[in-house]
Image: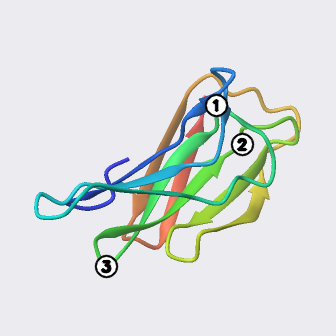
Amino acid sequence: MHLNAYRYLIFPLKEALFINRGLIIDINPWEPIKVSKTAAPPDKLLRSGISLQREYGRVAHILCIGGNEAKQCYHYDIEKNEWTKHGALPQFHTVTEQINVVYDEKQTITIFV
């Protein structure tokens, strides 16, 4: 994910399926490349939907929608480097397609098909 002009966030997949601890990569043309690790998610997340949450035009948070057997959603705060639970999808909901839109940097609208 492209966070700003010189900063990227990637989540390497474990066993080609699960989101693992992320890496924040700073690529500034005037400085050496810096790589730092994020906190690991509290649960295994399998193919969760990702919604970038912005504050004042910059990516400040990431919402991982569903992605485990409990269909638990998680919020990752980039600045604080911490994960918190944020609701869950309906129990017997099968997700085949996901569309999400962030409205006015205040509300995430998600449609599951």
Residue at point 86%, 35% (across, down):
69
Camera-side residue of 45 and 71: 45
Q: Are marks 1 and 3 in contact (CB under 8 Å)?
A: no
Q: Nearer the viewer, residue 60 or 72?
A: 60
Instruction: Say what amino acid the circle numbered 3 marks.
Output: Tyr
Task: Name the kind of residue labelled 2 in the image.
Answer: Gly
Give the mark nearer the N terminus: 2 vs 3.
3
User: x, y (%) of residue 38?
Assistant: 58, 58
Task: State the residue position of label 2.
Answer: 66
- Pick whichever, 112 or 17, lies toward us: 17
For label 3, the residue is 56
Determine whether 80 is above or below 12 in the image: below
Percent x, y of residue 2: 31, 51
State which tag comes first along the sequence, 1 or 2: 1
| On screen, residue 56 above or below 83 | below
The Cα–Cα distance between marks 2 and 3, rounded to whole angstroms, is 26 Å
